[in-house]
């Protein structure tokens, strides 16, 4: 896969302070902040009305469904608000998903809504939006209108003497003739300069307010950290189950097509040799000799299969010896360096071994490399391994290759796999695994 061409950054004649008020980001944030007020009014009224009605009706059974409807409505508001943040602030916040319903039926749904912390965080968001919306709306309107009006003051200053019978905009007046008007050339220019400063500062003020909005959406309308971790663990569990099932199918297939077939043929050959033993001892001897060769082949296949399940050398002598054995069987010369003060957890050690095994297999089959290296070391609480080859490159985990499967396996134990493989090589695959002693 070719490395994407990175264009040089565009050079702008105008400085960022002058460009910022005209950029699309500023206008999107202005619109978001202005919409906070009407949305805040609507959500506040809905939430307060529904909660008050539900609490008031708790003396009857009707209060429970009304409160459940209030919570469900707040979660629906969260859907709209996440979409608004995604469209205007480019803040992509995942939804919390459905409330975990343990019991079937409508009552189970009510209980799930009431027990869900996500539902109550949505309620808090709808209540906060009114005061926050008033503040953001006021700040945006005041800064934006004041900046533009003062910046363009020279263009409309003439309306004061013509229509209002005063020389300019009045800044101060005490009713006793002590008035201050912006009518001289210096005052008009000064007003324009101040307006320019406010005009340039307005998008940064809006960006700061929008940053608070982003934090509110992320903090109150996204899944909790615990829920995200549970979802991640469920996904990892599915990956582990699928991987284990695939390994079992591979073992069954290898046994059926390899050692089992050879053993069946061996039994038949020995049966025929037994029948010919008296009639033709020489032919029986040849058949026994062939059967002996089949036994050796079957034993070698069983050893290879056992090594694929879990190599004995890894259990007995650790990663250094096991990876050296892998390197010896690779078709490309491989230099192995293992620098580990102690051995990691057996499960992590096994994952590291099979990760290197698959990477070396890929090198043998696809890389056209002339040399490779394997480096393993410990960094804090992580086991690091790096496999490098001088082949043709182009390896990409996103294309659904074997690297994608390795990425999923490592992710199942909170590991990370990073591939750097430009077309033409070299290829460097780095994996990080938790130590977990």
Image: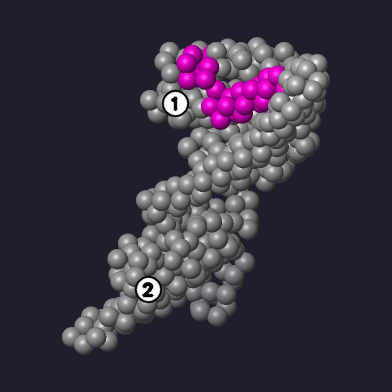
State the residue at coordinates (51%, 46%): 241
Dot 1, crowdedness within 10 Å: few (<14), some or many (≥20)?
A: some
Residue 188, can we see it?
no
Q: Which residue is painted at 33% across and 73% down in the image?
A: 108
> Secondary structure beneath disc 1?
helix
Kindly indicate the quadrant of the structure image that contains residue 157: bottom right
Q: Residue furthest front?
A: 278
**As displayed, is residue 356 above or below residue 317?**
below
**Percent position of residue 393, x then y:** 76, 28
Q: Earlier in the sequence, mark 2 or mark 1?
A: 2
x and y, in percent, of residue 121 in the image: 34, 63
Q: Nearer the viewer, residue 362 or 200?
A: 362
The one of 184 and 33 positioned closer to us in this rendering: 33
Instruction: Tell me where residue 135 appears, x and y as whole percent.
Output: 38, 65
Compared to residue 409, the image places residue 315 above or below, namely above
Categorize mark 2 by other alpha carbons within 10 Å: few (<14), some (14-19), many (20+). few
Dot 2 lies on which element?
A: loop
Compared with 273, 155 (above or below) is below
Instruction: Please tell me in which quadrant of the rendered image residue 158 appears.
Output: bottom right
* Magenta run includes residue 309: yes
* Residue denoted by label 1: 346
Asked whether residue 312 is in view, the answer is yes
Q: Please state the horizontal and vertical placement of residue 19, each as a whole percent of the image.
A: 63, 51
Q: Does 251 sit left or right of 51 as displayed?
A: right
Residue picked out by circle 2:
104
Based on the picture, tell me whether residue 313 belongs to the magenta stretch.
yes
- Span colored in magenta: 291-320
Q: CA distance from mark 2 to mark 1?
A: 42 Å
Q: Residue at 56% x, 45% y: name it.
A: 245
Residue 97 is left or right of residue 21, and the answer is left
If the image is split into quadrants, where does the C terminus sit? top left
State the scheme by which the image is colored. Answer: one colour
């Amino acid at each position: 896969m070719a490395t994407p061409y990175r264009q040089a950054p565009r050079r702008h004649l105008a400085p960022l302070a002058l460009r910022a008020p005209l950029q699309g980001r500023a206008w999107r944030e202005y619109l978001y902040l202005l919409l906070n007020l009407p949305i805040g009014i609507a959500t506040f009224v809905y939430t307060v009305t529904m909660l008050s009605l539900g609490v008031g009706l708790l003396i009857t059974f009707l209060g429970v469904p009304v409160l459940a409807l209030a919570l469900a409505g707040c979660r629906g508001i969260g859907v709209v608000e996440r979409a608004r943040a995604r469209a205007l602030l480019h803040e992509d916040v995942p939804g919390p998903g459905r409330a975990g319903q343990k019991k079937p039926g409508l009552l189970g749904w009510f209980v799930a809504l009431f027990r869900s912390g996500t539902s109550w965080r949505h309620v808090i968001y709808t209540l906060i939006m009114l005061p926050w919306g008033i503040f953001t709306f006021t700040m945006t309107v005041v800064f934006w209108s004041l900046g533009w009006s003062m910046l363009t003051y020279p263009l409309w200053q003439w309306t004061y003497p013509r229509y209002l019978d005063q020389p300019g905009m009045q800044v101060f007046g005490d009713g006793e003739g002590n008035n201050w008007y912006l009518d001289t050339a210096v005052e008009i220019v000064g007003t324009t300069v101040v307006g320019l400063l406010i005009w340039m500062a307005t998008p940064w003020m809006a960006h700061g307010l929008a940053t608070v909005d982003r934090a509110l959406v992320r903090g109150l309308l996204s899944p909790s950290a615990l829920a995200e971790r549970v979802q991640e663990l469920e996904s990892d569990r599915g990956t582990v189950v699928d991987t284990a099932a695939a390994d079992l199918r591979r073992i069954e297939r290898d046994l059926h097509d390899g050692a089992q077939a050879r053993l069946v043929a061996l039994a038949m050959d020995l049966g025929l040799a037994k029948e010919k033993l008296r009639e033709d001892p020489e032919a029986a001897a040849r058949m026994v000799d062939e059967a002996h060769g089949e036994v050796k082949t079957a034993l070698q296949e069983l050893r290879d299969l056992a090594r694929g399940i879990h190599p004995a050398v890894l259990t007995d002598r650790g990663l250094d010896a096991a990876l050296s054995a892998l390197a010896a069987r690779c078709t490309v010369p491989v230099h192995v360096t293992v620098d580990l003060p102690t051995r990691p957890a057996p499960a992590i050690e096994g994952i590291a071994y099979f990760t290197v095994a698959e990477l070396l297999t890929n090198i043998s089959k696809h890389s056209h490399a002339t040399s490779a290296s394997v480096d393993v070391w410990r960094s804090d609480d992580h086991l690091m391994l790096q496999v490098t080859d001088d082949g043709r490159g182009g390896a990409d985990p996103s294309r659904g290759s074997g690297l994608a499967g390795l990425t999923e396996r490592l992710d199942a134990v909170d590991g990370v796999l990073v591939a750097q493989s430009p077309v033409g090589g070299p290829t460097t695959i780095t994996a990080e695994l938790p130590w977990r002693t």
